[in-house]
Amino acid sequence: MAEPRSPVSASVPHNPMVLPTPEGSSLEMDPMEYTLRKRLPRKLPKRRNDVYVNMKTDFKAQLARCQKLLDTHREICIHGLGLAINRAINIALQLQTSSQGALQLAANTSTVELIDDLEPEDPDEAGEPLTRTRNNSAIHIKVFYPNP
Amino acid sequence: MFMPGRELHDNTQSACTASIQPSKLNPTNLTGSPNKPMQEGFRKVCSTGEPIPCPIPGLASEVLEMRVKEGSKIRNLLGFAMSRFQGDGDAAPTSQVLFSGTGRAVTKTITCAEIMKRKVRGLHQVSKLQYRTVTEVWESQESGPVQMTIHRTLPSICILLSKEPLDQQEPGYQPPVETLSEESKWADEPHGNRKPEKRPPSPCSHDLPSLKRAALEQDSFGTSSKMLI
């Protein structure tokens, strides 16, 4: 059983420099350096009327895209994860405002599990690549014209 | 007295009125970007949000209201909400809790509700979105008694969690998380006996330090990804 810690303690004698481990820190972080590489969120199903909001695309472009989708669909679904939650809400509320109340919103929340990879910085040292999972909040807003 | 409000572009969704006691203020001071009055030596004195009527119909009167702010600690919020929910001490347990947050506190509000749902199984949920007007008062630091009031429209969220069933036709309703389907999913796995470790009784995987770390990592995402190239 390759315990992730054992190769690290073996590598310490090679390194004369005392690694500055913070006293009393209960983190299970190894003193070795790792690169944190984030995997993309799990791929989600995508219909024609699904919009995944991100923080890289221009806000106005994403708003316009939703507006255009609403011309052809009676309902669209706007998804936002983490920091993009705010933007997703903003888009949905702006759509509702500009429709003069014709559109309704129905918001649902969820938790998305994300995976990080920890890769050893130095390939010579026999560090094990680690993975860590964490959670992030997400929002799913249905924007729709209510049935008459 | 002059009204600088009409000079401001309205796409920022904020209106601005200034009350000036001595009339020696240079009007060009206020025509700049209304979002960053800080650059012109203004300091935020206070910000008050108008009280919003709760948008969820059919609320019990004894609902526990949790107003989540940007700096609120999730552990404090949830510690209080959980103790009231379980009803330790003299008070009768509440059956409904309402989390509300505005602007940058929206994400934290959702996270609170999500953790709560995992700690207490079988909660019904209704979420509502709306704009909320927040009034900020900014004060000039140099020229003395000059105040500027900014009305800012921010998105806000209200999440009601209830032990009792809620109206399923209400937009934004979410039924309780089905634990059954999740357990059958784990049972399908070859390591069936690892199930209790995977799903600990206390849902600490969404715990506070890791959340904080996640937020920090998110900030440094751009730089770390650049280093990898």
Image (spheres, coloured by chain):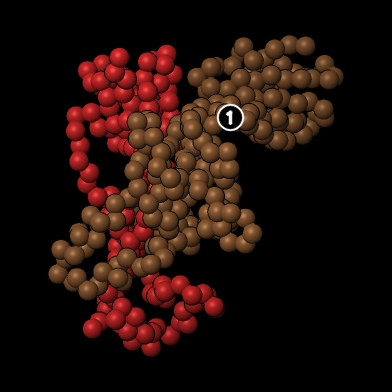
Chain colours: A red, B brown
The chain that hosts pointer 1 is B
Measuring 66% from the left and 30% from the top, which residue is drawn there? B136
Measuring 46% from the left and 82% from the top, which residue is drawn there? A17
Specify the farthest residue to the right: B22
Measuring 34% from the left and 80% from the top, which residue is drawn there? A5
Please state if B14 lies on the left or on the right of B130 as rendered.
Answer: right
Query: Residue B63's image quarter?
Result: top right
Q: Is residue B20 above or below residue B81?
A: above
Q: Is residue B124 above or below residue B203?
A: above
Q: Nearer the viewer, residue B41 or A136?
A: A136
Q: Can residue B218 be seen from the camera position used here?
A: no
* Quarter of the image where the N terminus of chain B is located: top right
Question: Which residue was labeled with disc 1?
Answer: B52
Image coords of residue B209 (percent x, y): 48, 62
Query: Residue B43's image quarter?
Result: top right
Q: Is residue B2 above or below residue B150?
A: above
Image coords of residue A132 (percent x, y): 33, 64
Image coords of residue B207 (percent x, y): 45, 61
Image coords of residue B172 (percent x, y): 38, 34
Instruction: Count neighbours of disc 1 (C-alpha within 10 A) and say few if under 14, some if 14 to 19, many if 20 or more.
Output: few
